[in-house]
Amino acid sequence: MTGVDEPDCHLTYDIKFDILTLYISQINLRRVIWTGRGSTIQEAYEKYDVDQVHYSTEVQAVIGRWASMFTGDIYILHPTQAATPGDDESPRVNCTKLRPAVDEARVRKDAHEIQLIKRANSVTAKAHRAVLRNISTFKNEAQVEGVFLDTCVAENAKNQAYEIIAASGENASTLHYVKNNEPFCGRQLMCLDAGCEWQNYASDVTRTFPLSGQWPTKEAREIHDLVETMQTACISRLGPGVRFWTCTSSHIT
């Protein structure tokens, strides 16, 4: 919601006064030498699109002061996020309405968010291509995972959106196969399902390809071509205002 990728931060939004407040961890000078530091309050103002910045230790006091001054409700995503333990039982604290609202808001991306998603996709595409360029020299799944990670990290995309699935042969029949530790041993196909994150925005790309560089059978090639045709047809139907289910449920010829 904020683009803040620092630990132990909190966020409040005053609906009536349109005030977005970020709460950040206070810098512990004893730990800076070991783990570095987060943002100062001034740096947070400069880096993030928020109206106010306070320390995380002030959340409880700020919420309590607001509750004493105003009569409105307090909305939280989960009962454990109450400013004070037990406050989720208060009739003024609601932990059911905010999540659907946030989910709905997240569906709509602004131009900045779209650029972040495109960057994540760009790095992921580069990593997939790096695997394909070298696949004929690989002997095992770990090498596939290694090259994919190496490419992403070199582009400063150090986090994956999910665990890499580099499944050869029958391992591809396990939907979330993440061991990635077996030799190819004459197997025909590889399913690579992997995507990086860029500033907390994810990519997700799945591709199946022959390990030898050539499709092992006519049937394998035909199945691949059919899936590719379906995917291309669905993508061509996407656009502003189009419901995703209408693209996937229609009969495609």
Image: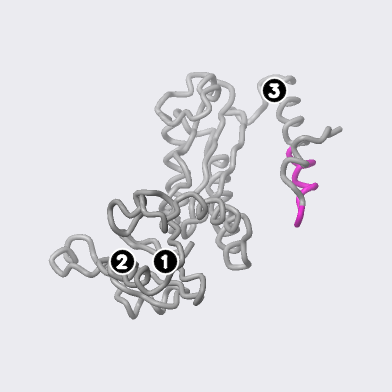
The image position of residue 196, as x and y in percent, is 49, 49
Judged by its main secondary structure, the magenta piece is: helix
Label 1 SS: strand
Q: Label 1 neighbourhood size at 10 Å, few (<14), some (14-19), many (20+)? A: some
Which region of the structure is painted magenta? 231-241
Tell me the kind of residue under disc 2. Val
- The numbered mark at residue 12 is 1
Magenta span contains residue 233:
yes
> Mark 1–mark 3 contact, CB under 8 Å?
no
Label count reads 3
Identify the mark nearer the N-term, 2 or 1. Answer: 1
> Which residue shows up at 60% across the image and 54% down it?
104
Identify the mark nearer the N-term, 1 or 3. Answer: 1
Observer-nearest of 228 and 132: 228
Q: CA distance from mark 1 to mark 3?
A: 53 Å
Tell me the kind of residue under disc 3. Ala
> Which residue shows up at 47% across the image and 32% down it?
138
In the image, residue 128 above or below residue 154: above
Q: CA distance from mark 2 to mark 1?
A: 9 Å
Label 3 SS: helix
Quarter of the image containing the C terminus?
top right
Observer-nearest of 239 and 162: 239
Magenta span contains residue 125:
no
The image position of residue 162, as x and y in percent, is 46, 42
Side (left or right) of 27 relative to 63: left
Asked which colour scheme the image uses, the reply is one colour
Tell me the kind of residue under disc 1. Thr
Q: CA distance from mark 3 to mark 2?
A: 58 Å
User: Depth-wise, is mark 1 or mark 3 nearer the camera?
Assistant: 1
Side (left or right) of 104 relative to 239: left
- Residue at image mark 2: 59
- Residue at image mark 3: 220
